[in-house]
Image: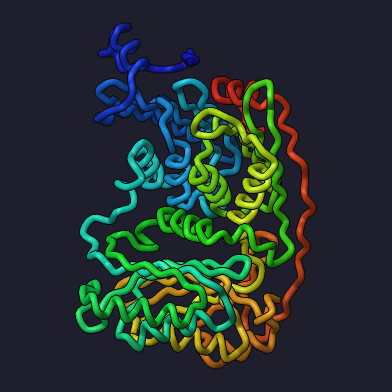
Amino acid sequence: MIEKKDMDWPASLDEYQKLVIRMNTPRSGILLFRLDGTSLVVYLLFEFFLFRVVIDNAVCATATLVKVDSARKDGILLEAVQVLTDLDLSIKKAYISSDGRWFMDVFHVTDRYGEKLADERVISDIERSLGASDEAAVVSVGMDPLTTLELTGADRPGLLSEVFAVLSDLHCIVAEAKLWTHNGRIAALIFVKEEDSGLRIEDSEKIRRIEARLRNVVRGATTAVSSSAITASSGGTYVDRRLHQMMFADRDYERGNSGVSETSVSVQNWTERGYSIVNVQCRDRPKLLFDVICTLTDMEYVVFHGTIDTTGDRAGQEFCIRHSDGSPISSEAERQRVIQCLQAAIDRRASEGFRLELCATNDRSGLLAEATRTFRENGLSVTRAEVSTKGDMALNMFYVTDAAGHPIDRKTIDALIERVGAGRLKVYEDRSNQTKHMQPNSAQEESSIAGAGLLYLGSLVRKNLYNLGLIRSCS
């Protein structure tokens, strides 16, 4: 284990107490804060453990540095990435090292506008959330439990319209929903409540009817119904991780690529060190690092070292991984499976084309069924969807293509806006990591996708340790 020379200890601890803290694993603890110039140092003093977080706005001109030091435990990297992702932060660079019993990470983050963090509430959320369990982080206090529908099966044009029509016919209100499609498969988490009472569905006979009707709609469907206080909006990356797990279990990664992918993944063994090296090159986008780390974690791989970098709209990631039992990837079949699963995890959320945002002040029964029926009648397929409600306001987002998976044309856009209403339906074009608001009959420009750049990392482990202990610039 490496002791960093700039480690600052509370004055009340003697040398023996410091030794005991370093040698043992975390249990319960309290928070101590110390302001050090422009850096806020947060100590989580556990019964036998020190968790250290430094948030630094001085070192880098273009990003805020979040440094995390702690004892290593299963899933700790994913927890840290989840916290930053749930706060809608972009991770532009990162250096990861967790050999031995110590976990050391440096994240270069920006807000959704690409700026350094200036909002004290966001900084406070980082301090409070890092080190907390993901279960504690995702449950909203005081939220009424909803009935959760998990649905996987074969995708086809108009499917979402039929699903929402079934739920409307059975007098269910969709409070939240999140849906992904990939390689001809669909995975959806839908949170519903009774239309009359606004409460979760308790009637077991009605639950059986819902499951039976949905299986009739979705070919080869797998459905599950449960009660949960976690929804798409309150659960953040909890819901995204569950969708990844559902599509992984449905083996969507084995069904061939449904389109042209910009994602390149390679895996090779570093025999001398006993690692497998995973290299990812793709277009940068929000939640990219979460999708990769989530997939590796759920496949029971441990990331020991890693370097993440972004240049323009391109992202490069490289990781030293082993199985949870300490062994590297041992066969060509396993290597190919890792490549396929990572490509699928990245491409599931990738979007190119048009995003429709439907807002309505009255979240009435049948609104989603009516809207998605309009999409179907205009020959559109929904590739991803996010549905949420806040009070009486319904906020719904749909990524759409034509029935063949191609971008929709100008005539179709105008017809949709005319039928739904310009005040309720907003249309955006997502191209090359940029979003363009589409107005009726406005001229559109084509944008090109930047070519891929290669990321040369050199000696990964040596570079990680250098950056973790001696960072002086952002270049």
Q: Along the horizontal axis of the image, is 231 left or right of 284?
A: left
Q: Can you see residue 423?
A: no
Does residue 118 lie above or below 101 as drawn?
Answer: below
Does residue 333 lie above or below 247 as drawn?
Answer: above
Q: Residue at x 42, y 45 (%)?
A: 83
Q: Tell which of 9 and 224 is nearer to you.
A: 224
Q: Can you see residue 138?
A: yes
Q: Residue pushed farthest top?
A: 15
Does residue 118 lie above or below 258 as drawn?
Answer: above
Q: Residue at x 61, y 58 (%)?
A: 253
Residue 202 percent coordinates (x, y): 21, 73
Colour scheme of the picture: rainbow
Q: Tell which of 151 and 158 is nearer to you.
A: 151
Residue 338 percent coordinates (x, y): 62, 46
Residue 75 percent coordinates (x, y): 44, 38
Q: Residue at x 47, y 82 (%)?
A: 217
Q: Tell which of 473 and 211 is nearer to you.
A: 211
Question: Residue 275 is drawn in which quadrant?
Answer: top right
Report the quarter where the C terminus lies. top right
Residue 441 percent coordinates (x, y): 68, 86
Total of numbered circles in the picture?
0
Q: Residue at x 21, y 77 (%)?
A: 203
Does residue 268 lie above or below 142 as drawn?
Answer: above
Q: Along the horizontal axis of the image, is 94 left or right of 432?
A: left
